[in-house]
Amino acid sequence: MERLALGVDRHAWRLVSRLRNDYQVQLQFPFRYAKQKPTRFLLSGAGVLALIFTDHRTHEILVPGSGTGDNQLIDPAETLSKWGNASSALPLVLGFGAVGILANSSRERETSVMLFEALLTSATWTELIKKMSGRERPREMEEDVSDWEGPGIFIDDDDDKGLQAFPSGHSTGIWAAATILANQYPKYNIVPIVGYGTAMAMSYSRMVLGAHWLSDVVVGGLIGYGSAKQVLSAHDSKPTPIDNPRFRIGADAWGNYKGLSVRYDF
């Protein structure tokens, strides 16, 4: 039992170290991207702004009958959205982990770990942005333009659920999972087709239900995809050192002490 406990403890601490690296690399990515490819960074930002400014028009085009209750896609969209909530991710992670342990398959075990890393890190960024933006959902609108209330600390609890449109959490999670699975099982063509196809359908279902605008699902999908690609890269090779990083997240262990540290260099 003592040996088993030590093994579990070692694997748990390794996972914490991986998550620490994931968060650090993902946090620094926008700054590195802006520095290394400023033109692409500016064009990407302009593209997102263009989507936001045209959201109302694109919503009318892509979701006809939204707000009238006449859209026949509402029922299947509700079913799909239920399968794509956060609670559905846990069985997926545990399922691959169980198969990996029972079949003694390292690929399934690694897939389970990578799914957990990608889903957790991408969800963290999405929730932070949601709280910072405080954007009004399409179905909650009372005026012609959706509101952006800003940081969640200024929002009443009663209004909080209606101000979590940007970005889409469902899109973040499904695109993160699809990217991990597509890269883990490239020999099976059906996996990326089903994975990315489901991700697109899930994202669209959130628009049909009036929960999100086009820019919400696009940005959510990009967060999930980008987080998953970083996790895949981290598992394929050793973490690449970053020159003079401003943000540093450390994991330390000595004796009976284990802890995390966060550092920012001015």
Image: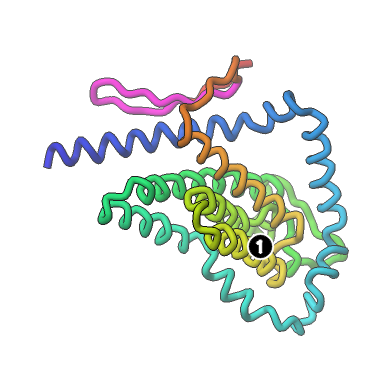
Name the residue located 79 percent from the left edge and 40 percent from the top edge.
44
Query: In the image, which residues are magenta?
Result: 246-261
Residue for point 85% across, 61% down = 145
Q: Is residue 39 visible?
A: yes
For label 1, count other residues whose C-alpha is less than 10 Å away and answer few (under 14), some (14-19) or many (20+): some
Decide if residue 253 is on the left or right side of residue 52: left
- Residue 206 coordinates in the image, percent (x, y): 67, 66
The secondary element bearing badge 1 is classed as helix
**Relative depth, front residue between 192 and 1:** 192
Q: Give how far across and how far down residue 73 sits, in percent.
A: 69, 79
Is residue 153 shown to the viewer in this render?
no
Residue ID at (30%, 38%): 11
Q: Does the magenta portion include 172? A: no
- Residue 152 percent coordinates (x, y): 65, 48
Asked if residue 18 lies left or right of residue 63, the reply is: left
Looking at the image, residue 55 lies above or below residue 23: below
Chief secondary structure of the magenta portion: strand
Residue lying at the far left of the rendered structure: 1
Residue lying at 64% horizontally and 58% vertically, measured from the top left: 160
Amino acid type at circle 1 is Met
Instruction: Identify the residue under disc 1.
Output: 200
Q: Where in the figure is residue 131, as x and y percent of width and height?
A: 64, 48
Side of 20 relative to 224 (left or right): left
For the C terminus, the quadrant is top right
Which quadrant is the N terminus positioned in?
Answer: top left
* 107 relative to 19, above or below: below
Q: Is residue 248 magenta?
A: yes
